[in-house]
Image (cartoon, rainbow, N blue to C red):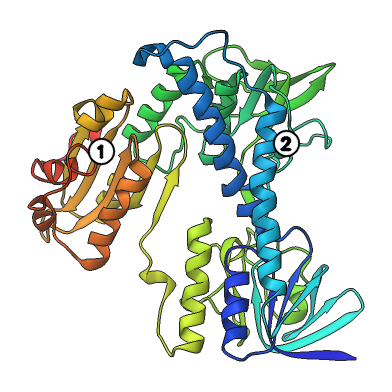
Amino acid sequence: MTKRFDAIVIGTGQAGPALAVRLAGAGRAVCIIEKGNFGGTCVNNGCTPTKTLVASAYAAHMARRAGEYGIDVKGGIAADMKRVKARKDEVVGKSVSGLEKWLRGTKGLTVMKGHARFTGAHSVAVGDEALEADLVFINVGGHPVKPVDMAEGDYLTNETIMDVDFVPEHLVVVGGSYIGLEFGQMYRRFGSKVTIVEKAPRLIAREDRDVSRTVEEILTDEGIDMRLEANCIKAKRNGERIDIGVECNDGAPLVSGSHVLFATGRAPLTADLGLDRAGIAVDARGFIPVDDGLETPVKGVYALGDCNGRGAFTHTSYNDYEIVADNLLSGANRKVTDRISIYGLFIDPPLGRVGMTMEQARQGGRKVLVGKRRMVNVSRAVERGESKGFMKVIVDAESRKLLGAAILGVTGDEVVHSLLDAMYAGTSADEIARGVRIHPTVSELLPTTLQELREPKDTDA
């Protein structure tokens, strides 16, 4: 017998639970389905656990630097990874259990465990249970991509590394972007020797070159080895070691480590949803196509979060929920294309990025101005002894509106939000430059930076 609902939500990542609860609160009969742990990527093996681990690694790093601040620390500094993991597991466990309790306690919301597969455009099977609804929301997230053929157990991913409770002797990280850099710095601070292998000529190639260069300098200063332009990455087990063939232009053609972490991106978990039965065809990368309102080509079926290719972050997934819910329940006309790109790289110091890069602004044919300030000229950073990095703001020379910014430095992931607010409000660079901010903070130097706008140099991109 088929169970009828007003709405079915597949997945409990950042978009699904909030949407299900809001729909239930509006009087709709809703079913939410989860095949794994509640909370999706962010809670289980993304933001929540990694930032908890980053905090432990930061504590170890600052303990080693205590003497710079006039503080004596007796004995050596070592990471007890069993305790580090236990702390991470406790934080994650509270988040998972709290979310499940919230969902199961919501009136009008049915929670089901199992693997959901489409049997038609608006019908879903979960085991022997048949469900149908006029509205179906897909929030299934993604999975790690493995760049070479290796047996499971011979390599780590951003998911399986969550089970590690020891310090690897030599961790080789394949992938020089956000996931790889965060884990690379983290494990270096825990005590591992770390080598980062990247196919591109520079790290985080989507960023401007000055950001890439400075991030590389920051990590190299901490003792992390870099192997860039690794054009033909290979991997195989060699006894107790893992050999990574890199064939770089410089350096030995082989890196031998105790463990390898593949941090080469993630792909949407769409292959086993039975989407063809719903009349939905994914693109070449497995993403579900959606329009500006996040609706698929099948009316009443929506895709939210990592599986739609419109943003691979927790905050964009949650914003997907807000767009869909406001449009359906409040008669709004919100569009995903109205969203300004913003994200962070949570190494230390962090990178906060909003809007366009210099390269993107130039490709659009715009005449731009740039304001730039090194963190060594920011009092708060100097006083904290954390003065690596810089602030860069990109402005349209004609309209004087902000186009983008990169804040690579202490609290850069927080500072960047004031610029985001200004961009949404359409505030000009000149208006921001006249503002007064608290001293001593990092944010107080944003007006100063905008007072020193100039034509960009080659080193600004």
Whether residue 356 is visible here, answered yes or no, is no
Which residue is labeled 1 in the image?
391
The x, y position of residue 362, in whole percent, is: 25, 49
Residue 186: which quarter of the image? Answer: top right
Which element type, helix, strand or loop, lies under badge 2? loop
Amino acid residing under circle 2: Val
Q: Position of residue 378 (x, y in %)?
A: 21, 31
Inspect the image, locate mark 1, and give the three-letter code of the amino acid beneath it.
Answer: Met
The residue drawn where x is 75% and y is 37% is 163
Residue drawn at (48%, 15%) of the image: 64
Residue 321 locus on image (x, y percent): 52, 73
Task: Please tell me whether residue 150 is drawn above or below residue 67 in the rendered image.
Answer: below
The residues bearing labels 1 and 2 have C-alpha atoms spaced at a distance of 37 Å
Whether residue 290 is visible: yes
The structure residue drawn at horizontal position 66% and vertical position 63%, both measured from the top left corner, is 99
Residue identified by numbered label 2? 148
